[in-house]
Every structure is written in structure tokens, then in C-alpha cells.
Image (spheres, rainbow, N blue to C red):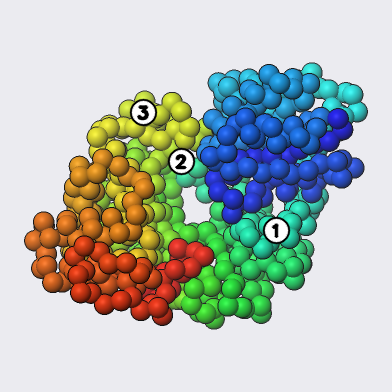
Amino acid sequence: MLGITLTTINARYVHAALGLRCLRANMGALRADTRISEFVLGDRPADIAERLLADAPRLIGFGVYIWNVEETARVIAILKRVAPEIVIVVGGPEVSYETDEQRVCTLADYVVTGWGDVTFPQLCADIVAGRPPGQKIHAGKQPPLADIALPYGEYTDEDIARRFIYVEASRGCPFKCEFCLSALDKTAWPFEVERFLGELQVLYDRGARHFRFVDRTFNLKIAASLAVLEFFLARLSDDLFIHFELIPDHLPEKLKAAILRFPQGRLHFEVGIQTWDEAVQARISRKQDNAASEANLRWLRDESPALIHVDLIAGLPGENLVSFGRGFDRLHALRPHEIQVGILKRLRGAPIARHTEAHAMRYSPDAPYVVLATDALDFNEVQRIVRFARYWDLVGNSGRFHRALPLLLADQPFARFMQFTDWLFARTGKTHEFALEKLCGYLHDFLLETGADAGTVVAAVAGDYEAGGAKGKLPFMAGGTRPDPKAGGRGKLRQTRHVHA
């Protein structure tokens, strides 16, 4: 056995692991003997182990993240029972801190913490050469970005044809938001622009059209941001889709002017507000100009062609249900296409841990370590927000309910949707597996029970149902019209339903 396998368990097939490709690109003389093998959540651990063993590897490197750590540990446990001679190395953000407390680290032969571009290849070289290191934990060395081989040649033709292409124009983040591991970074480090754009050109020439930038702060350095946007402006096509994460309070006029030159729906901006509460912001070391953020979000939604996805986090230290709801209403008034309601997670190593005792922060003991209760939110309130988030994703973010959603929210979005949340959970006892027909029926029933005009409700819910391309009829649609085949609303991406909203 001479081969090396790099593997991870992705959330979904469309998510191609950039980290594995960064490692293979930097394997040097071992690159030809290194292969990438990816899996998805839901694959059985025994099946994953079987497929990994089919390649007869000498060493397997696992990329470990908060969403796959439990499944990864199960796979490694099987491998250690049936093929103990294989060397197992784990790396990634989930195993970069608190390694002594983790089963996955105990099972592995070696752990690489932090950056792996240099340290992992060197570890592999030592093992292959018969010089296995005595120490188990290897702190990743951070080389200058100019010394790192870029990973984009590791994307296969199948990746380009069928998956999201993840790219990074920079690494790191200068901000210190305590819920994020990037708070530990000293700054952000940009890749050399011309070198990076050259790699984008190769990907584009190979047919890549869906680019997702993983930069924490894409609009930190405006000159680099503009260079990237100009690259894509010169290569516009109907199937081009580009995702960026933006700092909410930093949108200078030059960047606005470039954004305005894109057609509608080509740009997708993820904007992290997280909380509007200034006391909470100060508590978690988040520097954010709320007035500028609000103005920028209003401009992006009202004047720009971009699709806007904004993040809020529930469960931050000191934030209660009332203040979170107030923040949701403030954000909803700005009309972003999507509001992602997230629940605070205790990422291993993140500075948010310093508030655990002072604010009675109680987290789930199992990944993804979501907050269960705080001194400002009891367990029941957290559970209600969890259900709110799930239902909001189904209704508010889906792009399917442009007519019914305003009736549902009226002039109190958070309170009204929480009322619907409590009603729907009491009625069904579940948060998943809602067929569109069932969901439309529940919306119809709730709106009628809360006093909405019957004719208005039927017209709104039936209109949304038909606009999505559905061909059946709901129980309350007797005599209704057939759907317009030109109504659209369905596409490869959920975001496409928001383009004309």
C-alpha cells in the first residue's frame, strides 16, 4: 500500500471540499499517489469504510468539521478494527482545538491543527519514508500565501459540471467576533490578485459558472474586490452565479457602481448582521455600525441587482426573545430576499466560551454544540426559535409564498410568525418533511383561524401554489384555474425564485 487518500463527509454532494483540494495541490512528490474521495451525510459509515479500503491506501487524511465529526469518528472506528495498519490523520477546524476531549482525535494516529498546506504533506512524507513522528499532535505552519500551490486544478470536469466551485481570494479575518473561529486570526491575508484571477480564468474556460467565495470579508480591500468583479463583468453569461460574504457596514461608492453593472440575479451576497443589539455586539467584540449596515442593506435590496441573504444568530450572551424579535423585525423591514435564523454554536476554540459561566450558557454536548439555554433564553424559548428558523426557511426563504407571506406576517413579522410556528408544531409535531401541498393547506387553515378574509386567503395561497409550477389542486381550490406553464419559480437554486420578488 503506497497510496494516500484525502477524504471528508460533505453536507451535500454539490459541496465540493476546497480543503481537500488545497492539500492535494500541495503534496509535492506525493501528489500523484494522492487521491480525493468524498462522501455525503447520510452515507453509512460501513459503506464509507468499504469504499475507502477499495483503494488500498497506506494513509487516509480526514477533513473534520462540526457537521461531520460524529460520522467521521464512526468511520475511523470501523477502519481501526478492520484495517489497523492504515495510518489515520485528522485535520480541520473541528479538531484544531480541545483535541484531548474528542473521540475522533483519540482514534486517529495523528492530528494536524490549523493550516495544513505545509504540515500535512510533510507528515505524509515522513510516514511514507519510514520516519513516523513520535508526537501525535502537529501544529500547522502558516506559510506565506505566495508559497502555497493553488487548488483549482484539482476540480474535476464532473465537479465543474455538477457542483459548486469554492474559491478564496483571501484567508483570515481582522475582526474579533467571539462566536467565530476567525476571531483568532491576526488579520486577513490576500492571495496575489493576478495569480488568483489567472486561476479563475482557467476554471471559467473549463466551463465553471457557479463560483462561491469562502472569504470572510470579501469587501475588506475594495481594490481587490473591484478586480474580481471586473473579471466577472467581462465574462457575463446567463448561467453565471457568484456568491460573496460581505461586511455589512462597508460599501463605498466604487463598489456600488460595480455592483450596479451586473444583471439581476447574478450576484448573491451573504451579509452577517448577527445581532442589532449594541450591548450584545459590545459583549461579543463585534464592531458594527448599525446605521451604515441598515443603509447598505436598504440600498442593496432596493437599488442593486443582487440577491441578499442576511444572517441573524439567536442565543448570543445576554440577548432575550424580545430583543431578538425586535432585531428580526428591523431586518425584515429592509426586505432581504432571505433571512437565515441561526442558533449559536460553541465552536471549539472560539472566544465565546468566556461567557459560559457569566451568562449561564448551556450547550448541547454533541456536535454541532448548539446553545440550549442562557440566562436570557430558557430551553423552551430556544426550542421555539429552532422551530421558527426551520419553518421560516420553508416559508419565508423558499421564494414560494410571495402572496401569502405578507398576509401571514402583517405588521408584526416576528410575533406573527412565532404564532404560526407554535400553531404548526402543535398541529403536526414535526419540523421536516412538509410536502408543498400540505404546507399550503396549513397556511390556509392558520390564516383563516386567525381572522383573515377567506377569499383573500384562497387567492393568495392558491396563487403561490400555482406559480410554483404545481399541477394538482388543493382541497380549497375546487374550480380553480390550471397553473400557468410560464409562471416559473423553479430552478437549480432556490435563490432564483427571488429574482423578480
Residue at the image position 71 percent from the left and 43 percent from the top: 37
Residue type of the residue flagged with mark 3: Arg
281 displayed left or right of 453? right
Q: How many other residues sit within 10 Å of disc 3, few (<14), some (14-19) or many (≥20)?
A: some
Q: Which residue is mark 1?
A: 158
Give how far apart the Cα atoms at labels 1 and 2 are. 35 Å
Q: Nearer the viewer, residue 415 or 387?
A: 387
Q: Helix, strand or loop at disc 3? A: strand
For the N terminus, the image quarter is top right
Q: Is residue 156 or residue 439 the one in the foreground? A: 439
Say which of marks 3 and 2 sits in front. Answer: 3
Residue 215, horizontal then vertical, whole percent:
59, 55
User: Residue at point 65% right, 24% down?
Assistant: 78
Q: What is the total number of numbered labels drawn onto the structure image?
A: 3
* Residue annotated with mark 2: 179
Which quarter shows the C terminus? bottom left
Q: Residues within 10 Å of mark 2 (few under 14, many from 20)?
A: many
Q: Are marks 1 and 2 in contact (CB under 8 Å)?
A: no
Q: Quadrant of residue 302?
A: bottom left
Q: Is residue 187 left or right of residue 390?
A: right
> Which residue is rendered at x = 44% and y = 51% of the image?
287
Q: Is residue 275 visible?
A: no
Helix, strand or loop at disc 2? loop
Q: Earlier in the sequence, mark 1 or mark 2?
A: 1
Res 180 seen here: yes
Of callouts 3 and 2, the N-terminal one:
2
What residue sits right under mark 3 in the picture? Answer: 362
Classify 10 Å Cα crowding around label 1: few (below 14), some (14-19), many (20 and above).
few
Please state which amino acid type lies under the numbered disc 1: Glu
Amino acid type assigned to the residue bearing label 2 in the image? Phe
